[in-house]
Amino acid sequence: MRKLQEIRGLKYPDEFVVRHFFKRGLSERTGRVLELGSGTGNNLSLYLTWGWDCIGVDYDDQALADARFNLGDSPRLLQADLAKGLPDLQGPFDALIIPNMLCYLSAAQARSRLTELRPHLAPGCEVFVRTRLTDDYRYGRGTEVEPDGFRLATPETGEEGLFNLFYTPAGLVELLSRTLALTERTELAVRFDNVQAGRRVPGNSDLVVWGRLG
């Protein structure tokens, strides 16, 4: 991996990915981890440091190029439009992380992708999901195209024209329970303000859910 000063894009893993990693004892063993929406590799860098076999999936050419620059040749990085389907994954996987990606899929797409993932996950697979809630700043700012799903009109967040689906806590838990049957589940609300494009954006609201495949 590159030195921290050389890293392109985000330099550090999501703080809740870090919490999950250590609280669930993933630093004490190794295995195969799959990240959907892996971006420039900031989350996979944590697993890679502890000797995990890393597989990342992303849609964006530049993000994948930056991830290869940042992480080297060890991770397997795949390009795929997850709105259309999964790539050839070659499981099983011992950990699955989906931070800030489900919100860009429709309800039907999210349910399909999670259902399709199930056979690729090893028994007892550790699962981490983080996504946006209906009390998030962006909710309702745009054109509604399905219940709780909007084509955003938020240039201040850099997501102008993108689709976003917002969940209730109960709705996200129901989705994960039906598709992945998580056990030992933990739910953490995450609310914060941010500065984007020089503007303070208040009221970001996410739910983090982690657990073990049932």
Image (cartoon, rainbow, N blue to C red):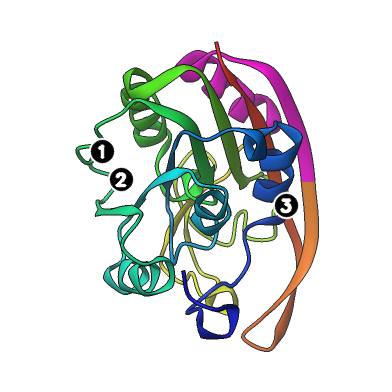
**From mark 1 to mark 2, how far is it between C-alphas?**
6 Å
Residue tagged by mark 1? 86
Relative to residue 140, is residue 116 depicted above or below? above
Q: Residues within 10 Å of mark 1 (few under 14, many from 20)?
A: some
Disc 3 to disc 1, how far (Cα)? 27 Å
Place residue 14 in its image quadrant.
Answer: bottom right
Query: On the rendered structure, is 171 left or right of 95?
Result: right
> Do callouts 3 and 2 mark residues in contact (Cβ within 8 Å)?
no
Q: Is residue 184 left or right of residue 152?
A: right
* Secondary element type, mark 2: loop
Mark 2 Cα shell of 10 Å, populated few (<14), some (14-19), many (≥20): many
Per the model, the C-alpha gap separating discs 3 and 2 is 23 Å
Mark 3 lies on a secondary structure that is strand
Could you tell me the amino acid type at mark 3? Ser
The magenta-colored residue range is 169-189
Residue 114 falls inside the magenta stretch: no
Q: Position of residue 80 (x, y in %)?
A: 24, 51
For mark 3, does the 10 Å Cα neighbourhood hold few (<14), some (14 to 19), or many (20 or more) residues? many
Q: Is residue 105 above or below residue 45?
A: above
Tell me the residue that label 2 is attached to: 82
Estimate the x, y position of residue 183 in percent, counting from the top left.
64, 14
Marks 3 and 2, the one that precedes in the sequence? 2
User: Which of pointers 3 and 1 indicates the residue nearer the eye?
Assistant: 1
Q: Are marks 1 and 2 in contact (CB under 8 Å)?
A: yes
- Residue at 52% x, 35% y is 30
In the foreground, 125 or 139: 125
The residue pinned by badge 3 equals: 205
Drawn side of residue 121 relative to residue 191, left or right: left
Residue type for callout 1: Leu
- Image height of 186 relative to 135, above or below: above
